[in-house]
Image: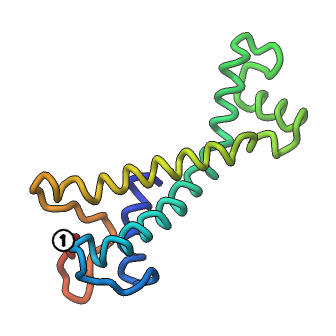
Amino acid sequence: GMLGVTPVVTCRLERMDLFGDDRGTSGEGVGGAAQSRAASLAASVIGGTSSALFSHPWDVLKTTMQGDLGGVRYGRTPLQAASAIVRQRGMSGLMAGWWWRTLNIVISTFIVNECFLRIPRYCGWDAPEPRGTRDESSRRVRTAS
């Protein structure tokens, strides 16, 4: 999610112009600075939440097994540990702490995405264009600046 989905979604949201039309006012991305940051934040919520949703049960399972190295309480295999968690806490046991972890991932994703989009310009490099953002009508890749 972090460097896969988020930059592509950011670019597509900017193209859709959902966050106001202030294009060309600051040279930030496709639209202005506020639009670019709003698109980046929305994309970070989408990418971060989807990443947390799919990875969190595995993280709970891993942490549970690490806390029970002898396999006494939860068993020695991932399947035994998952069964024990579901038996003790229900399916929601695999999502324990999801909100906190999702918040951390969304914030981290936003920071990394902003760095990905903005640092190259400050270093004098061409800004990277996320995969999947090719403008098919002109058959060339758009630039972020």
Residue linked to disc 1: 145
Give left or right: position of 11 versus 48: left
* 38 versus 71 height, above or below: below
Q: Is residue 93 left or right of residue 5?
A: right
The front one of 82 and 127 is 127
- Please state which amino acid type lies under the numbered disc 1: Ser
Percent across and percent down for residue 84 are 84, 30
Q: Name which quarter of the figure residue 77 lies in.
A: top right
Q: Please determine whether, in this image, residue 75 is positioned above or below residue 25.
A: above
**Residue 30 position (above or below residue 85):** below
Which one is nearer the viewer's eye here, 46 or 77?
46
Judged from the image, the secondary structure of the residue bearing numbered disc 1 is loop
Residue 35 shows in this picture:
yes
* Furthest residue toward top: 70
Q: Where is residue 96? Give x, y as percent.
A: 75, 40
Place residue 88 in its image quadrant.
top right
Q: Is residue 32 left or right of residue 80?
A: left
**Rendered position, 55 above or below 145:** above
